[in-house]
Image (cartoon, grey):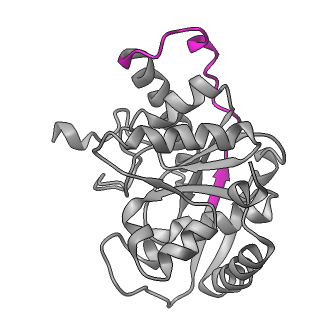
Amino acid sequence: MSRRLTRPSRFWETLAVVIVKPLSWLLVKRDWRHGDRVPRTGGVIIAANHLSWTDPVLLSHFLYNNGRWPVILAKVALFKVPLLGHAVRSLCVIPVERGSSEAARSLHTAAQRLREGCAIFFYPEGTCTRDPRLWPMVGKTGVARLALESGAPVIPVAHWGAQELLPYGAKRPRLFPRKTFHVSVGPPVDLSRYAGEPPHAEVLRAATADIMAAITEQLAELRGEKAPETPYDPAGR
C-alpha cells in the first residue's frame, strides 16, 4: 500500500502542522502528562474520551508532539463538505458510515492501517459525552473488536479543558481567559483475559468496559475527583 494511504503527503502533513500547532499554542495552555507512554512505533490504538469538537485537533497536536501521526476515524459527512472533504481525505482520515452495513468497512480499513504500523485514534463513545458531569459514557464495542482481532495495544488517553474552550453544541469558542488543555496517558489496557475468546457480544462489552475504565481512571487523575462507579448509559435513560 502506498505511503499516501498510511500518512499524508509531505505537503498535507506540513500544512496541517503549520496550521494546527500555532493555533493550539495560541488557544490553550498545556498540561501534558505521561506522553512517554505513547508507543513511538508499531500499530497502536489510541482510545480517548470526547468532550468537544475542538479536542480532535488538540489531541492530534499532543500525539504529533509525542511522535505519532494520528489516523482518525470521522463521520462520513465530513467527506461531503467542499474543500474540507478533500482535506480530511488527504490527511488519511478514515470515514465512518454509522448505522449502515458500511460501518464494518471502517474497522476493516483501520485494521489494515494497524498492520502497516499506524496509530489509530479512536473515540469509543462515538460522540461527545452526554453525561451531565462530563465523565465518559458507556463505550461502543468497535474499539474492543478492533483491538481483539488485531492484537494491537490500546493506549487510554484522557483529557480535560477542551469543553471550556468550546462546549458541546456551542458555535463560538470562549477564548478568554485562556484555557488549559490537560492530557494524561495511561499504560496499555490489559485485555489478555480475552485472548482466544470468540468476539461474542458479552466479550466485546466486557473488553469495552475495561477500556473505558482505563480512560476514566486517567480523567479522574486530571480532575482530582472520584469518578462515578457506573458510567452514564444514554441507551438506558
User: Which quarter of the rendering shows the C terminus?
Assistant: top left
Relative height, residue 92 to residue 139 (above, below): below
**Residue 195 makes an appearance in the image:** yes
Residue 203 placed where, x, y %? 44, 16
- In front of the other: 214 or 220: 214
Q: Residue at x 65, y 64 (%)?
A: 60
Does residue 186 appear in the picture of this structure? Answer: no
Q: Residue furthest front?
A: 1
Residue 51 image offset from top left, x and y in percent: 43, 61
Number of numbered tags placed on the structure image: 0
Residue 115 lies, with reference to residue 176, above or below; the image says above
The image quadrant of residue 44 is top right
The residue depicted at 41 percent of the width and 47 percent of the height is 136
In the picture, measured across the screen, residue 35 lies left or right of residue 72, that is right
* Residue 83 percent across, percent down from the top left: 49, 83
User: Is 117 on the left or on the right of 198, as rendered?
Assistant: right
The quadrant in which residue 89 appears is bottom right
Within the magenta stretch, is there residue 191?
Answer: yes
Q: Nearer the viewer, residue 84 or 131?
A: 84
| Residue 148 included in the magenta stretch of the image | no
Taking the view exactly as shown, the residue that stands out farthest to the bottom is 176
Front-most of 198 and 10? 10
Q: Which residues are magenta?
A: 183-201
Position of residue 19 measured from the top left corner of the image (x, y, whole percent): 67, 85
